[in-house]
């Protein structure tokens, strides 16, 4: 297998394509479709480059929110900076995400595991989500952003409590995920 995934609909009207070093998210933008929404989080080991190819996307970076369009250029998200993404209801949108360093291969595995949580992100359970965060360089942002506390939260819940209670990642490696 080449490592490229067939497009798959994750939520109503929301399609993902996972490629090596590139994630493509397409929101159909229908009136009854779900929106693409990523809650406030941060990464310790990689930067993200978000590009809007079609439509518009709300990007919150640190304390500032800006609407990006194809004319805006890339949204550069430095490691350590809290950020969130949200498409607009009823507006078609196509977005890509790349990482820096480009050889940071945990990101594709992160998405494959996150999108495989039974019941999805909204009902998949805190422990399952924190376990994926623990293995994928993701940290939630608390109402008062305290990085060391957010890291400890993920490490304890995702690294210790989740496995102790029987939670397991669907994919342990990209080779397994792409098979």
Image: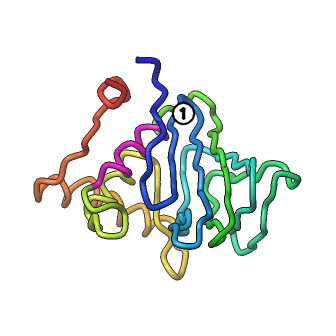
Is 172 situated above or below 76?
above
Residue 65 in percent (x, y) is at 74, 72
Q: Is residue 59 visible?
A: no
Q: Is residue 27 visible?
A: yes
**Residue position marked by numbered label 1 in the rendering:** 104
Residue 76 in percent (x, y) is at 74, 51
56 and 164: which one is in front? Answer: 56
Whether residue 76 is in magenta: the answer is no
**Which residue is found at the position 38% from the left and 51% from the top?**
115
Is 14 situated above or below 169?
below
Whether residue 109 is in magenta: the answer is yes
- Give the quarter of the image for residue 122: bottom left
What is the count of numbered marks?
A: 1
Residue 23 in percent (x, y) is at 57, 41
Q: Residues within 10 Å of mark 1 (few under 14, many from 20)?
A: some
Please identify the quadrant where the C terminus is shown.
top left
Is 123 situated above or below 52?
below
- Residue stretch in magenta: 107-117
């Amino acid at each position: 297998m080449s490592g490229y995934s067939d497009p798959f609909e994750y939520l109503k009207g929301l399609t993902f394509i996972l490629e090596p070093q590139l994630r493509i998210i397409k929101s159909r933008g229908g009136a009854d479709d779900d929106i693409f929404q990523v809650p406030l989080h941060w990464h310790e080991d990689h930067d993200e480059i978000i590009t809007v190819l079609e439509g518009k996307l709300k990007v919150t970076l640190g304390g500032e929110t800006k609407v990006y369009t194809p004319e805006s250029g890339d949204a550069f998200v430095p490691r350590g900076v809290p950020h969130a993404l949200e498409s607009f209801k009823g507006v078609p949108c196509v977005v890509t995400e790349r990482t820096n360093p480009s050889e940071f291969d945990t990101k594709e595995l992160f998405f494959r595991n996150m999108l495989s949580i039974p019941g999805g992100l909204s009902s998949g359970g805190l422990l399952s989500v924190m376990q994926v965060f623990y293995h994928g360089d993701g940290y939630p942002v608390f109402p008062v952003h305290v990085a060391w506390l957010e890291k400890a939260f993920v490490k304890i819940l995702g690294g210790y409590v989740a496995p102790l209670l029987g939670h397991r990642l669907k994919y342990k490696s990209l080779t397994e995920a792409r098979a």
